[in-house]
Every structure is written in C-alpha cells, then in structure tokens.
Image (cartoon, helix red, strand yellow):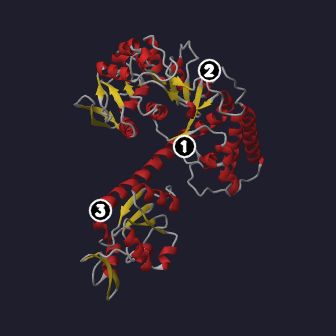
Amino acid sequence: MRADLRIIDSPEGPVLYSGDKPLCHPRYPKSRADAAARRGQIRAQTLVLVPSPLFGYGLELLLENLPEDSRLLCVEHDEDIMAASLRHFPRGLIQDPRLAFVRASDVEQACGFAAQSFGVHLFRRVEVVSLTRGYSLFPDFYRDLAAGLLDMIQTYWRNRMTSLHMGRLWMGNIFMNLAMLPACASLAELEFTRPVVIAGAGESLERHLDFLAARRGCFALACVDTALPVLGAAGITPDLIVIAEAQFANTYDFAGLQNWNIPIAADLCSYPGILRRFTGPRYMFLSRFTGLLWFSRDDVKAVLPPFIPPLGSVGVMALYIASRAAAEDRPIFLAGMDLRYPAGKPHAKASPSHTLLLAGQGRLSFPHYLASWYSRPREKAPLAGGGSALSDAVLASYRDALKEIALGRKNVFTLEGEGLDLGVPALSHTQAEILFGQCPARGKEGSGLSGAAAGCSWDAESVSAFCAAQAAELKALAASPGITAQQAARMDYLFLDAAENPPYPLGEAGFIRRCRERAAWYASRLARRGTFSQGG
C-alpha cells in the first residue's frame, strides 16, 4: 500500500485516509454511508454504479432495498486503494450475485466487466450512488464511467430494436450467401496501392465529378453503392464498390449497370440477388451486427469472412475498409460524405433516392417515404468549411464514427464541400492534386487495387459440408418436440426477432412452436442458396 494511504480505526470500523484526507467519515463511516444508501431511491432495471466503495459501508442497506431486476456495480480506479479495500471488504458482499466489484483502469474495461457479470439486457438506466469520498479522487473517471455505462445500455437497446426488425433478414442473407464464398476472396486480401478517394452520395459529390474524371488515373476510386449511379451518369467507373444493404431496395443502386465486372467489397448480410450478379473480384466481410454466440463457434469461425464492427453506414464501412487496406503513406480522400441534405434533396443528382423523389413529386403531392427522414429531430452541427447546418441524430452518429476511424490515421482528408465537419482537413482540388502527385502507385499500373486477381479464400468442399451440417441441425430442431438449452446456445440467431429477453422460456409451448418455425425458415434459406460460381 502506498505511503500516503493509511488505515485508522474509528468507533464504527476502519477508515482509509489518503494523506490527511479521510475517504469516509472519520468517526461514523458506516452511519454516514447507510444514510447515503437510504437517500438513493433505486428504480427497477437500474445498474447502480457505486464508485470507490472502500470497505463496503452502506452496501448491505443498498442490497436490502434493491429491486429484483437491478444490480450494484462497485468500481475502484486506484490499484492500492483496491488492495486495501479487499482486505476489509465483507466476504458476504463479494459472494452476493447481485453485486460485482472490480478495479478498472479505464471505462471500456469496467463496461466490459459489467456486461459479462450481469448482461446488458437487464438494464434501462444507470444511477450513481456515492457512499464514500473516494469519488473525489478521480471524479472525471467516474463521470466518464457513468456516461459509458449508459451509452452501452442505450446502444444495446438500439441494436436490439434493429435486430427485431432486421435480424432474421440478415441471418437469412448470410445463409443464402454462404455458398458463394468459394468464388470470393477475403477482405483481408484487399490492398490499395494508390491514394484512395471514397465517393459518398451527398450533394457535394456533384461538384467533384469533373475533377475526379480529369484525374482518374491518379487514385483508386471506391464508392458506396448509392453513389454508383451518380458516378455512372458522369462516365466514371469506380475501382471498388462497397455493398452492405440487406434489402431488395438496394437493387435500385444498380439499375442500368452494364459493367458487372467491377470489384466489390461486400457484407455477407447483403441482398443475395445483387452479389450473385457481379463477375469480378468479390472481397467478403461480415458486419458483426450483434453478439451472437453462433459467431463464436469454432466451426462457424472457420467459414465466415473477417468481421468488421457494426458501423451502421456504408460510407463509414468504406472508410474503415480503406483505412486498413491502404498503407499508412497512402492518403484517403472523402468526396460527397456530407452527412446532411438540403430540403427536398436527400442525395446527389442521379442517385436512386433523388430520381424517385422527382418521379413521385407533384405540385400537391410529396413522396411519403421522405416523411421519416424529415420527422427526425434536427440539431445544428458545424460544417467543414465553417458555419453550421441542420442535421439529425442518425447522421451525426455516422459523423462521429467517421471521426473515430480518421483519428487512427494521419492522412485522411475531405474534398471541400457542404458536409459536416469530420475533424479532418478539407482540401481544394488543387491541394488534393498535389498530394496525388506525391504518392505514386506501387507495383503494376492499373486500378490501384492489389489482390484483385487473388485466388479464392474458401474451399468449396468445406463450405458445402458446413452448409449441410447447418441445414441438418435446423431440420432436426424444426422436427423436435422441444428445444434444449444446448440447442438454444448453439443456434441463438433463432431469437434475433424474439420479443422475449433472455433467459428464454424454453419450456413454453408457444415459444417452442415459434422456434421450430424459425428453424424451418432458416433451413429454407440454406436450401435456396443454389450453386454460385465465379461470374454468377
């Protein structure tokens, strides 16, 4: 224990001092902590953060009044204080399943411990109950921790709601796309040998089209699927298309496409009817949209493509992919990543959304599907060129994700436009052209992609055997009178669209019936996967 820490006895028990400062009441540590515990009115489904609990004073009273579905997370930031606490912490509290105590050096570590100890699904809110003065030693850490825990809970429930609506579609697409893997390459094989321009479909892309066309041989051009028709209308062919949309609506982005030999980087969750059309190199990845145990199975990991985080936006995915596939000295430029839109114009001209808007708009009519966009709460956000504009919470979250990825590289730029401030330098066309010239291509001249002619990353026989095993497992469950806990753990994707939260009612007849129906549906996706080959 550090020299500045000492323990002095009081009438109610030991008191820990940091220098001359007592970290709880010097004479009545238990009484004062109990009083603080009584003041806390804990609601149901609450994760209670107890910072620096020291010797556990007040925790027994908190546990007595704790709602059945709430839990106590005790966190100590200081290693020496933690060692002193454990020597005096009541053993009965340590053994109580409703309480967990951890020494955490950072917020992420403490959040991970809480999720592992209790699960996130129990909670809807976070409350801080400070029973000692230990909080005052590291107030910024404990404030950040409370915010981090709340963000973890809110993220879980946002993802949960998304899974309820999209989870079955994503998994169904995975099963239908599995058979295509032997004709594909892993995303890990993709490499950019030139500077990279990533084209989004924001309105400002229009002002960059002439420049991109004139300097086309100086960079590798990756575009999001929505930007493909915008580039096509300007006579520009990208070197790579990033595809991630799971729904049929994505087909509008490819209407009229003549060159299906363009390389793609595609999420395994993407709409199968699009992926099977492409005849060129296909680099596969999987957005880990939720924490399924199925993803962790050894037989599953041996077949699935590389995971990337659940980034939400295909534009964010494109930057994530480029930041890992381009060497550190290859600059990355963002064009049309506006993350805002003027009234009545959701994307650049020639994009499907803009074309459909014009087709459905009259003097007295307005396309109904735009109502959800414009009904989102708006907030002012700073623009890259100065000033501010209205955006919404969804687009602002994509901005934050782009910022976080860009922080990992020193050479991410955006071409000047009217987009949100992404925290990276905004360059004129002249400045961008200078950087193009400073980074000549490596290796052979061409598209700026390396690995485009790489062999397949998957063995056809292994993939076929895996698909057959999955189908047999699903058919067996669909025909069985019940579902065991082992089956539920092995195939937890069955519950992506289940209204119930874990632990699941595996003994209820209605729940069993729905599980059997889901198993039969997924088995049908595997049966429909067909035979894929390079070229379709």
Which is nearer the eye, 227 or 193?
Answer: 193
**Which residue is at a point 57% across and 26% down the rendered structure image?**
451
Q: Which residue is mark 1?
A: 164
Residue type marked 2 = Arg
How far across and down, in percent of the image, does residue 150 sit?
Answer: 39, 54
Chain-order first, disc 2 or disc 3:
3
Residue 379: % across, % down: 29, 37
Mark nearer the viewer, 3 or 1: 3
Q: Residue at x 40, y 13 (%)?
A: 213
**Viewer-proximal residue among 194 and 225:** 194
Q: Position of residue 151 (x, y in %)?
A: 40, 51
Between the C-alphas of marks 3 and 1, the distance is 38 Å
Tag 3: residue type? Pro
Is the N terminus in the top left, top right, bottom left or bottom right quadrant? bottom left
* Residue at 30% from the left image edge and 59% from the top image edge: 140
Q: Which residue is mark 3?
A: 139
The secondary structure type at the circle numbered 3 is helix
Identity of the amino acid at label 1?
Leu
